[in-house]
């Protein structure tokens, strides 16, 4: 679908210079001399490169729609992660580098994730916002330590390090944010 250069919004996926780019930031500029244009910061979906580009209203750009499919995490084998499409039961294997080693540590058996496809090729991966993990190692509770703004280091399943409140002990299940690994709350 072709759109005008001044219609680009953050989050749009564009086909530009024979590659796929996502618009990170857009700024509409009207200089004193000459025509108005959109200054767009683009990030390459394939290799992560960044690019700043100017688009005038008369410029036509190809907007691409990505297909998002829910997949269930099955298992890790070597450096490959195996997922199953929950509608077709078709399995796909993605390399750990595609997901990212830090993000792959959050994966647990049966977890639902979103995989983005363009022309049946996976190009994006999304974890749930919060995940429930077990605390495998942390310091014991120190008597008299208050819960107000004090945290202690902890190791979670998958080798994730985070900071937890003093009342959280080994074996407890907690909810953490996948964006930064921060403690959210105790699991129900």
Image: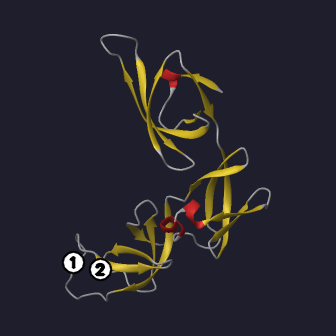
Circles 1 and 2 in contact, beta carbons < 8 Å: yes
Q: Is residue 171 above or below residue 120?
A: below
Image quadrant of residue 172? bottom left
Q: Which residue is mark 1?
A: 146
Q: Is residue 90 left or right of residue 171?
A: right
Image coordinates for residue 154, horizontal then vertical, percent: 37, 80
The residue shown at (21%, 78%) is 146
The residue shown at (80%, 57%) is 88
Q: Is residue 58 above or below residue 139?
A: above
Q: Is residue 140 above or below residue 9?
A: below
Count every numbered label the image shows and give the total: 2
Image coordinates for residue 117, horizontal then vertical, percent: 67, 48
The 10 Å Cα crowd at callout 1, few under 14, some 14 to 19, many 20 or more, is: few
Q: SS at mark 1?
A: loop
Q: Which residue is mark 2?
A: 166
The foreground one among 169 and 62 is 62
Image coordinates for residue 68, horizontal then vertical, percent: 65, 48
């Amino acid at each position: 679908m072709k759109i005008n250069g001044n219609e680009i919004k953050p989050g749009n996926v564009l086909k530009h210079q024979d590659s796929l780019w996502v618009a990170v930031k857009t700024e509409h500029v009207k200089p004193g001399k000459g025509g108005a244009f959109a200054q767009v910061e683009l990030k390459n979906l394939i290799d992560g490169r960044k690019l700043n580009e100017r688009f005038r209203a008369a410029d036509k750009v190809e907007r691409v729609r990505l297909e998002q499919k829910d997949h269930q995490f099955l298992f890790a084998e070597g450096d490959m992660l195996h997922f199953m499409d929950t509608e077709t039961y078709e399995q796909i294997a993605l390399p750990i580098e595609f997901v990212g080693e830090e993000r792959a540590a959050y994966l647990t058996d049966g977890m639902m994730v979103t995989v983005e496809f363009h022309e049946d090729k996976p190009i994006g991966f999304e974890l749930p916002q919060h995940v429930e993990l077990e605390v495998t190692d942390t310091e014991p509770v120190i008597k008299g330590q208050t819960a107000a703004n004090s945290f202690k280091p902890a190791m979670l399943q998958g080798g994730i390090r985070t900071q937890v409140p003093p009342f959280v002990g080994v074996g407890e299940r907690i909810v953490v944010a996948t964006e930064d690994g921060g403690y959210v709350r105790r699991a129900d």
